[in-house]
Amino acid sequence: MIKQFIKSHPQLDYRMPSPNAKITDGVLRSERFNDIYFSSENGLAEVRHVFIEGTRLADQLKSNDHLVIAETGFGTGLNFLAVLDLLKKLDVDCVIDYISFEAYPLDKQTAYKARKPFRELKMYSSLLFESWPDSWACSHHRLFLNDRVHLHLHYGDACEQMKQLDFKADVWFLDGFSPSKNADLWTGDIFYQIARLSSLKARFATYSVASSVKEGLFKSGFKIEKQKGFGKKREMLFGYKKNTSILRRASNQNKNVIVIGAGIAGASIAHGLRTTNIPHLVLEGSEFIAQGASGNPAGLQSPQLMAAPNPSMQMSLACFSYARRLAVQQEVVLSNGLVSLNYPEKQGNRQKKMAGQKWPSELIKIANANHISQLTNIGITEDGYIQSAGQVINPVKLTESLLAESEVITGVSITSIKRINEKWEIKTSKGQTYSASDLVLCIGSGLPQFLKRFSLPSLDLQVTSGQLSFLPKNTFFNNLSTSLQYGGYITPMLNGKQVLGASFDLSATTEVTKKAHFHNISLLPNALRKLMPNINELQGRVSQRLASNDRLPLVGDWHESIHLFSALGSRGLTNAPLLGLVLARKIAHRPAGLERNIMRLIDPERFSIRATRSKSRR
């Protein structure tokens, strides 16, 4: 049936194209572009001559506390590693946002092998190998050098990506393949975007001296100079932007933040604030952290994939890329791999349509019932697909690890919030007073009442209950070795708990009920439902969820310097870590790292903006 469905629907390709790169005579060459990635004489020496010295990067690192470096063509990551090496050697306090674009990503083994001759970069090269993103068409975010360097790696067409981003680069490494072999990376549109995304007197360097490059940069407002090239290459270009306007980057020097809520949202924004050097304090009403859904014994991390391209899917992929790596680093992964069944019928039809597209195999690999039965170690009668990249994590442990280096005060009841002298002042029932330039509300299901109580602008939000059912030991399902999704989900037995989830109760009850147990069982395919133990043998845990009208998160500015980070729904474990980092960067006046159309999707002001537009059309 799957094959028949695929034949009747046109295919979309969600895989990143390969550069078809091979190492020949010690040099990495792209067969797609018939060009080398770096000089055969000494690639690292070339990088240092052209890009490091050409942009006077050492001087800039010494004289700035924050630098934005942008690059066209990530390639093997050699330029990036040279920057890490320089930053470490200089021993300065500068922090870096490194923004790079790559349309034909290398696999990590090839890139690592190509970097092997540069032994002085071995440590950094190994770190990059471990963090190397999968070839998914989205933005990938990684942190290096104790979070001092934020890598924003955008996979896709550089020009299209640039059009959706807003940042001001201080330095540009123009490092695509030769203009004669990869003209798409040296167009007038590209140069226009580079100029738009450049700070006052941004510096650039490139090995290319092609007339089209010189003309494009000059027309875009750059002063151009030539100097001796590297090795056999006679010349190279460097220069800076000729800018008459005085644009100064906003400072975060006087920023400090109070985060209200210590679930996965509060933990994620706290972690993001720490990585951006913003002082912060976390206040939690309960006596312990992770008391809501973050307190569940297990939770799934997987992307929300769709049959048609959509910004929300791009956001989900970017979030999953970051969260998946973070979970591994924090050692909170309980189980690897997920299986999604083509059940119930509505979900099955959607999944068949989606699986009919061309996906990276780690995101979707079509499998029949027999294959799934072998993988999961129990009898399955439905076809589906395998997500080998998906995983089950420990939410409590993740929340704790993200908060480990933040000051957290629990058992806090807030009695007043006032704006005094451009600061927010918070008072508690115990008589404490706290003040901050910014507040971030991560209250989850308590947000509607909180906004009402303190006369803050409200939103139309929905609170529901989600109950998990815990299966006893010695049942048929204890043999399950891989988590199943099917409208609900069931995990293997992990740390003595086997989780069946999850209910969706509009009553927003906080009590564990037999009705919710019945609901969770009813989601299972018929053959599995019959094998469930007696409902009286089930235990459970219930927590409340918050959702917006469009089921998308609320992430961003809300009222003066109050920010919302809420309404994560059932996907908080996947979406929260990156979205917390993105919001922290915004508060710190650093590049957020997500495309503009994604930022609009999650902006808390989107509902009022839509309402205003609707009225204007009448």
Image (spheres, grey):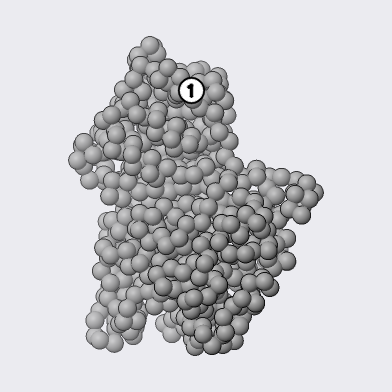
Residue 334 versus residue 279: which sits nearer the camera?
334
Is 106 on the left-hand or right-hand side of 87? right
Q: Which quarter shows the C terminus?
A: bottom right
Residue 483 versus residue 542: which sits nearer the camera?
483
Residue 170 versus residue 392: which sits nearer the camera?
392
* Residue name at image x 71 percent, y 45 percent: 11
Q: Quadrant of residue 513?
A: bottom right
Disc 1 secondary structure class? strand
Q: Is residue 282 visible?
A: yes
Is 124 on the left-hand or right-hand side of 191? left
Q: Residues within 10 Å of mark 1 (few under 14, many from 20)?
A: many
The residue beneath circle 1 is: 29
Name the residue furthest left: 91
Q: Quadrant of residue 260?
A: bottom left
* Residue name at image x 48 percent, y 23 percent: 29
* Residue name at image x 48 percent, y 83 percent: 539
- Count of numbered labels shown in the rendering: 1
Compared with 392, 25 (above or below) is above
